[in-house]
Image (cartoon, grey):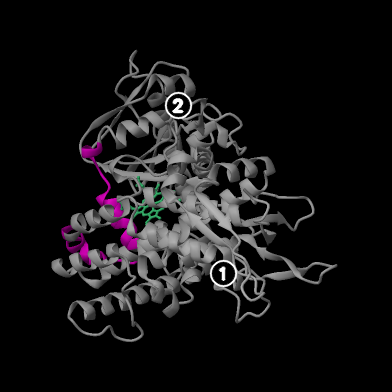
């Protein structure tokens, strides 16, 4: 009997085995697709005659257990976009590794979940997942992280949501000091500012006078490096950037590997941006660890160790969290990644956003004039008279509170750029069965039927895909064009101004988990943009005029897919009001 079995197996050629395995897999895939497709159709039809308490339909998939993993890995953005187009109810589910992920892209369903059920949804596991997978925390120390997290997060909120925060004051001080030196007109690398060196400057001279008249630069490189150089010291102190001059490249490399970290791809895969992201993360964590070591020395009453000398300008937020972690005995491999997540947030999201606003605004001469008129009372540039025949740099005054309170058009440009160029995501795990409800407005806009409610079960995960809503023509007319006016009220307020109306846009995420840096981010973006507007004229080098670059996805705020060259010249301040 045994001999017969062996001879039968031996008689099967490897080609036959491969074919049989292939046929078996194809049969499994086809039947999985058939069954999941049938379930999808039945879940899409109303629950009996009722639109209430519906199950969320899971999109059909081919492979059991892995579910939608493959198309998500191949092209995450494109796949999610197609899923949204296929899902009339504004919500759909995906299966990954046997778990259910509800994806919501209708504003009222998002609000109903993240604001209406904030106690029934937890972001702890998502937050921990990102801290481990993206920022390199040690997964064995989850309990230690959870013990200190409440206090460390409260310290962060306390500092970032206070108005004006210490970090905003430091940033505005930096903008005042360095804004007039965005480009220095110096052709010696030694005399150029770090942000100019990153932007490959070429100085153009006036044919008649022979004087330097404008500087040609790579705009994204200039703005990113300038903003980061001015803003990051408000968090980690100036010495951090002096001791680690390559920090911006490392933050950028970490950002480029973000999606691979999220997907949990192993380090050895031959993907160049994944390898670079690992190296960058190790260097960044090393730099933060060194700073924490110096803070430990100070806390123990000693001198800070080399290379640190003066840590007075390190933010109260960073020092406060450091003290909290010391009190809890939180291990280094949890606290360093936590601070890295902050450094990354500050070194990418606002820098990218400021670039997009400047490109959109400078490409519209009428808009730029309106903005300059609006910000004039709160961002004033003046030219001091020459001393001993030497030209003095322009002087800048900024009233950040005035900008935020009284410049609705500038704020509308900020929100319109967030709508066009950001992909905010809120995620959480459902803790107990719950039901989320669509608003009548959304049901009219999205599916033209009566409002529906959906049931989510404990243990499922849920995420809001605001990007789909941000480009939905049901909510935003001509959704791909830049129209800041859509965020302004149609009538004027008592003070004779139109006011900002954010409507259903939620660029900072939703509910309790929304971005804790939102107040600070909005204030600093407005201060940077206003300062550049009042100090600098800008024109594109491309003879076709300003061309807003296409975007490539980065976590939250997109990157331009290619940089653009622009010419900067200081504004003639004698002619401005
Ligand atoms: C244009 C600028 C920014 C945008 C569009 C933005 C947007 C977001 C979004 C959508 C989230 C996820 C919220 C959620 O889960 O619902 C988030 C989280 C976060 N953001 Fe921002 N953010 C910006 C700037 C900043 C800045 C400047 C900081 C720090 C100073 C910051 C710190 C954080 C932190 C720490 C979290 C995680 C919150 C948590 O773990 O609960 N963000 N941000």
User: Which residue is painted at 41% across and 73% down in the image?
Assistant: 238
The quadrant holding residue 295 is bottom left
The quadrant holding residue 431 is top left
Does the stretch in magenta take in 126? Answer: yes
The answer, for residue 123, to whether it is visible in the render is yes
Front residue (pair 80, 158): 158
Instruction: Say which of marks 1 and 2 sits in front.
Output: 2
| Rendering coords of residue 116 (x, y %) | 27, 32
Q: Which residues are magenta?
A: 118-147
Front residue (pair 30, 476): 476
Front residue (pair 124, 300): 300
Which residue is under mark 1? 195
| Rendering coords of residue 223 (x, y %) | 56, 61
Do residues under tags 1 and 2 come within 8 Å of each other at their CB atoms? no
Task: Work out whether 399 lies above or below 27.
Answer: below
| Rendering coords of residue 24 (x, y %) | 45, 47
| Rendering coords of residue 133 (x, y %) | 35, 61
Residue at mark 1: C-beta within 8 A of ligand 1 = no
Q: Label 1: state its secondary structure.
A: helix
Does the stretch in magenta take in 33? Answer: no
Q: Label 2: state its secondary structure.
A: loop
Q: CA distance from mark 1 to mark 2?
A: 43 Å
Q: Quadrant of the N terminus?
A: bottom left
Which residue is under mark 2? 494
């Amino acid at each position: 009997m045994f001999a017969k079995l062996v001879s039968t197996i031996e008689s099967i050629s490897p080609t036959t085995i491969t074919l049989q395995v292939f046929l078996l897999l194809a049969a499994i895939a086809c039947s999985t697709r058939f069954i999941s497709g049938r379930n999808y159709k039945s879940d899409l039809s109303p629950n009996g005659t009722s639109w209430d308490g519906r199950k969320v339909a899971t999109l059909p998939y081919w492979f059991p257990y892995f579910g939608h993993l493959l198309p998500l890995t191949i092209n995450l953005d494109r796949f999610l976009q197609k899923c949204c187009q296929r899902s009339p109810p504004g919500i759909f589910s995906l299966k990954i590794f046997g778990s259910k992920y509800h994806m919501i892209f209708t504003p009222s369903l998002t609000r109903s979940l993240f604001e209406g059920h904030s106690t029934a949804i937890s972001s702890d596991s998502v937050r921990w997942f990102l801290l481990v997978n993206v920022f390199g925390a040690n997964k064995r120390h989850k309990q230690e992280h959870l013990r200190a997290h409440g206090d460390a997060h409260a310290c962060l909120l306390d500092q970032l949501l206070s108005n004006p925060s210490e970090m905003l004051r430091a940033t505005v001080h930096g903008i005042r000091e360095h804004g007039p030196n965005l480009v220095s007109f110096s052709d010696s690398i030694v005399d150029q500012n770090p942000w100019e060196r990153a932007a490959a400057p070429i100085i153009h001279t006036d044919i008649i006078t022979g004087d330097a008249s404008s500087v040609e630069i790579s705009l994204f490189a200039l703005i990113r490096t300038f903003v980061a150089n001015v803003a990051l010291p408000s968090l980690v102190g100036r010495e951090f950037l002096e001791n680690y001059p390559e920090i911006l490249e490392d933050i950028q490399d970490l950002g480029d590997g973000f999606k691979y970290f999220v997907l949990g791809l192993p380090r050895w895969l031959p993907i160049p941006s994944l390898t670079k992201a690992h190296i960058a993360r190790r260097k960044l964590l090393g730099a933060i660890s060194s700073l924490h070591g110096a803070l430990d020395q100070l806390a123990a009453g000693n001198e800070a160790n080399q290379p640190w000398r003066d840590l007075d300008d390190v933010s109260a937020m960073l020092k406060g969290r450091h003290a909290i972690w010391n009190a809890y005995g939180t291990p280094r491999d949890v606290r360093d990644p936590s601070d890295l997540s902050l450094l990354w947030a500050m070194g990418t999201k606002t820098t990218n956003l400021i670039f997009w606003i400047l490109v959109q605004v400078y490409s519209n001469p009428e808009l730029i004039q309106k903005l300059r008129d609006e910000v004039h009372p709160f961002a004033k540039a003046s030219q001091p008279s020459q001393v001993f025949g030497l030209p003095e740099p322009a002087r800048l005054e900024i009233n950040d509170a005035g900008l935020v309170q009284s410049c609705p058009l500038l704020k509308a440009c900020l929100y319109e750029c967030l709508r066009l160029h950001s992909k905010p995501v809120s995620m959480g795990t459902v803790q107990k069965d719950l039901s989320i409800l669509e608003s009548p407005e959304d049901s009219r806009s999205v599916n033209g039927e009566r409002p529906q409610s959906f049931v989510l079960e404990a243990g499922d995960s849920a995420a809001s895909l605001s990007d789909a809503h941000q480009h939905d023509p049901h909510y935003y007319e001509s959704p791909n064009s830049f129209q800041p006016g859509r965020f302004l009220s149609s009538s004027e307020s008592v003070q004779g101004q139109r006011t900002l109306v954010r409507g259903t846009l939620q660029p900072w995420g939703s509910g309790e988990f929304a971005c804790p840096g939102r107040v600070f981010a909005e204030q600093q973006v407005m201060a940077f943009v206003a300062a550049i507007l009042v100090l600098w004229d800008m024109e594109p080098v491309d003879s076709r005029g300003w061309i807003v670059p296409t975007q490539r996805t980065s976590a939250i705020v997109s990157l331009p897919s290619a940089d653009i060259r622009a010419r900067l010249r200081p504004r003639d301040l004698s002619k401005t009001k």
